[in-house]
Amino acid sequence: MREKYELITTIMIHEETGSYIGYGIRYGEQTVSDISVDRVKIEFLIERMNTHELSPLHMMDIIEDFLAEDSDFFSCN
């Protein structure tokens, strides 16, 4: 059976803002934590990655693209 991308939850502590929950992605031994504080967005990303059976070799590229697309929301035109 092929492994799947999974949601991970981490309690993060920041000196200035205090603690928060960060959501990330795990695939086998590869883990990227604290991608977003928005659980729904990360769950949606994981669903897409699993549906399309994306190779874990591309995991960081996909996450970088996700973060770039997400930041476009805040950019000024």
Image (spheres, rainbow, N blue to C red):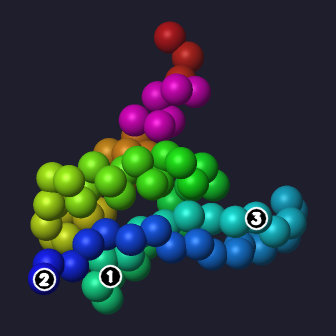
Q: Is residue 72 above or below residue 19?
A: above
Residue type at the position of mark 1: Gln
Q: Reading the chain from its start, which is encountered first: label 2 or label 1?
A: 2
Q: Reading the chain from its start, which is encountered first: label 2 or label 3?
A: 2
Residue 76: quarter of image: top right
Q: CA distance from mark 1 to mark 3?
A: 22 Å
Q: Position of residue 52 (x, y in %)?
A: 15, 53
Query: Does the image show residue 64?
Result: no
Question: Alpha-carbon neighbours of circle 1 within 10 Å: few (<14), some, or many (≥20)?
Answer: few
* Residue 63 - label: none
Residue type at the position of mark 3: Tyr
Residue drawn at x 76%, y 64% is 20
Residue bearing mark 2 = 1
- Residue 10 falls left or right of residue 4: right
Question: Alpha-carbon neighbours of circle 2 within 10 Å: few (<14), some, or many (≥20)?
Answer: few
Element class at badge 2: loop
Residue bearing mark 1 = 30
Q: Is residue 40 above or below residue 73?
A: below
Q: Is residue 47 above or below residue 24?
A: above
Magenta stretch holds residue 71: yes
* Type of secondary structure dominating the magenta stretch: helix
- Residue 12 falls left or right of residue 2: right
- Range covered by the magenta-colored residues: 69-74
* Residue 20 - label: 3
Judging depth in this view, the residue of 61 and 45 nearest the camera is 45
Judging depth in this view, the residue of 31 and 9 nearest the camera is 9
Q: Position of residue 29 (x, y in %)?
A: 31, 88
Element class at badge 1: strand
- Residue 49 falls left or right of residue 20: left
Q: Position of residue 1 (x, y in %)?
A: 13, 82
